[in-house]
Amino acid sequence: MKKTAIHPRLDNSSCGASDTCSPTSIARRNFLKTTGLTAALLAAGRVPVMAGPFSPADFDKIIPADKKLSKDWIAGLYARGEALTATAPDLKYIGMPINGICTGQVYLGGDGQLWHWNLGGARDTKNNTPKGPRFVSPDVARCPMSQGFAIKAGGKEFSLDGKGFAKVEFTNQYPMATVDFADASCPVEVRLQAYTPFIPLNRDDSSYPVIVMRYTLKNTSPGDQKVAIAGWIENISNTKSGKRLCVYRELDSLSAVECSATMGKIKVGKNKAANALGMGSMALGLMGGGLPDIVDIARRQPGGAGVFVAKPDGLENGAVSELDFSERAFASLGKSVELKPGESQTISFALSWRFPITQYTKEFGRKTLKAPNHYATLWPTATGASAAVAQRENELYGTTRKWVDTWYDSTLPYWFLERTFVTVNCVQTQLGQRLGAHGKEPEYYNFDEGVKCCPGNCTHVWHYAQGLARVFPQIERECRDKVEFGLGFDPKSGVMRHRYGSGKFGDAIDGNCGTILRVLRESQMTTDYSFLKSIWSRVKVAMDHVIHKWDADEDGMLEGPQHNTLDEPWHGQVHWLINLYHAALKASAVMARQMDQPAVAQRYESIVAKGAPAMVDLLWNEKFGYFIHKPGESDHEKHGSTNGCHIDQVLGDSWLWNVGIDPILPKDKIRKSLEALWKYNFTPDVGAFRKVMTNGRWYATAGDAGLVMCTFPHGKIEPKSGKKSYAGYLNECMTGFEWQVAAHMIWEGMTEEGLAIGKAIYDRYQPKDRNPYNEIECSDHYSRAMASYGAYMAACGYQYDGPAGKLAFGPRLTPEDFRAGFTAAEGWGGFSQKVAGGQQTASLALHYGSLDLKEFAVDVVDGTQAKTALSTIDDKEIASDFKHENGRYVVRFPQGLGLRSGQTLRVKFVP
């Protein structure tokens, strides 16, 4: 395998001495010993067997240093592979979020049914708690309300689910999915392609309360077939009095049945919000031209029985059915087609809803608040939302499909593409609400840590997340402005509450520093410095507050109680918090120079210049090969990781890769720290570790591999803690932390180890065991898991600075033949690179929006050399300057370059 080049970060004004900016070329480590395939360790049935065989002596220190990873499993890290598919009985856990951003929560099940409906924001399960039972007790697909689809063909009726067809196969294409239905007794095969409009960089077009179900019917028989397809919905309005209503509507691009209710004689008064919550409506629509030939707005029975009998004869546009609230009410809609042998036809349905009010929380406890759903302010009816999609269906479907094709048309392994991207789906769940303006509060995003768990846009959790910022950067910018530096911020003191909604929560140092880093990232995902100018004064006050509170003497070493994401103040000198503090200072220095404040930047840089070597002198343990935590003197200050090998020990330097800033700590110390994490914290069997370290929640069980939060290879020290559960955190495998380390390893040249950590997560979330779309920490769809996207950026060597007009790539896998998708501030597309005859060629094909560049750079692939570069847009040569700098080919465009959707920039590096 070719060497993996490590390229320098995008040039920033705070770049240090030249030796810290020089590239390093590190060969793939070949220390992973392999053995024959056995099933001795993984009784849970991983295929292929991951590792082994092991003897009891291998676990004398709980985690074996020699991982004994099998040849087949290692090969699977790199193999292109195929999209995730599943058939019965492995369909029951699958639940892909399929609704628009912050419009509720609906899953697409493995057999094509829609389930886990939660449109009003209620806490719908007691298991969504910080105690974390979700991993070991995953939900099985179920839908209390009656909703579904069926076809009639060959004189028989078949429900479009696992009960109606003998063969059902689910295929991931997140944010789309395909479900194929076939049965020997049915003359028609059916393919469902389900999606909600999902267009990166376009937040609004990705926030419809609409699900599109595109059914393609194919006649597989030798004769003509008349086929009918219909769907039904239940009226789920919950006003508990009044009347259940259903109205039939015919619009230009949509025919629909919409279910709602009247409020009866309820007095509005102080219960106005509660009543509005109950007044939600839901619609089923038939998209495209032509009217339905199956309609029933007064249906009284659940399920699909008799659904093909109802005809719209005499039913006029606007017709209304009214039933007493004591009765269950349903509505159905469908269409018939005639198919010749081998002929196919696609019929699209839309399910939509409108709940004017949502329930949400700002604080811990069962108390819920109510506020307008932003999406409900845009359309007066549920049908209105689906009609808006229907009018643009070709465009919205086409662009969503284009993104899917762009993302998966890659040389990277399918498993890696899937696992690093699906975590973005957390914003399509009840983890978050886009609240309309209410009271004194503006319109903003209210985000929990996980679904209905741990409220308040928690800074010390969300700063790990990288995916949302690259896919929908507008959302992250609004959160910085309105929440962290808005509702949760004191602009005078610089205090940023780590949970915005409650005065009970003060600031957490990791949350403060991580959020400051996020501001630079958000600025880089724009085309100018307007965003940074609007927020810089608040960022500066926040950075100065951190210095004043925790580093008053400005020696770069922290003091006092340091509250952090492990939910307890740590004391003394904490390696990972110091490193993250230094990273925030480096980012602040970059922003200060961009805001023309060099003296401010110099102050921040001088603190790092003193603190980084002091951290190494005090906390680096050469014998251990990693950084340690030196706790405080008193008994109540001695909890923490102490002399353990802690997962986040170089978190700050990991963060800096995401914003293109040079490292703080010596490269050899960073490398050794990551090697120690692999040696001491990664285990092929978490169960063996947890037999000894029993505290903590289960996010990996016996037979699962994972990267443990903290181990004590040089003495089993039980960390003291004010609360036993917090000590248990150190024994867990939490994917957000694991992905952070995996990304850092890939950046630093430990590609195989980083991939192995990610693949272990992928294996834990196989559909036979649990929902592959739901990475769990203390609740479902945990936001920290979006750190996975950082591993994707590392594999691509992607770095971007929009205001500076710089874009760079340095692929870590197959750089001689590489292809992957990318996003920028206002456009997205595909990057590709090939080497032929010793000549390297790189291309940017823009598929959406626009991309303005002043500089484009790629890492030099081994065996190539160049003296100049030929740059073209759609094969027309453009002016460019070429330099070979620090192991990188750099092309600058003196007049600037503006790519538009459909155009391709190609650069040939000519010897």
Image (cartoon, rainbow, N blue to C red):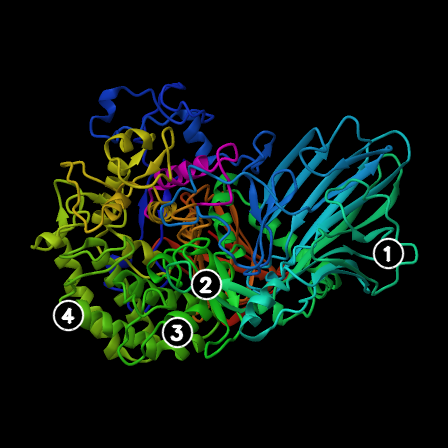
Residue of label 1: 291
Question: For the residues marked 2 and 4, what is the alpha-carbon distance in whole angstroms?
Answer: 43 Å
Q: Secondary structure at mark 2?
A: loop
* Mark with earlier residue (4, 3): 3
Q: Which mark is residue 487?
A: 3
Q: Which residue is mark 4?
A: 554
Q: CA distance from mark 4 to mark 3?
A: 29 Å
What element does badge 3 sit on? helix
Q: Report the amino acid beneath label 4.
A: Glu
Looking at the picture, how far across and down is residue 352, in whole percent? 67, 58
Q: Residue at x 73, y 42 (%)?
A: 303
Would you call the spot at circle 4 few (<14 residues within 10 Å), some (14-19), or many (20 or more)?
some
Q: Earlier in the sequence, mark 1 or mark 4?
A: 1
Residue 320: percent from the left, percent from the top? 81, 62
Q: Amino acid at mark 3?
A: Leu
Residue assigned mark 2: 368
Residue 854 visible? The answer is no
Callout 1 amino acid: Leu
First-in-chain label (3 vs 1):
1
Residue 443 rendering spot, x and y as whole percentages:
51, 73
Q: Earlier in the sequence, mark 2 or mark 4?
A: 2
Q: Position of residue 585 (x, y in %)?
A: 26, 67
- In the rendered image, residue 767 lying in the magenta stretch gets the answer yes
Pick whichever, 596 or 833, lies toward us. 596
Q: Is residue 861 left or right of residue 158?
A: left
In the image: residue 602, left or right of residue 747: left
Q: Secondary structure at mark 4?
A: loop
Confirm whether the magenta stretch covers residue 656. no
Q: Residue at x 18, y 67 (%)?
A: 550
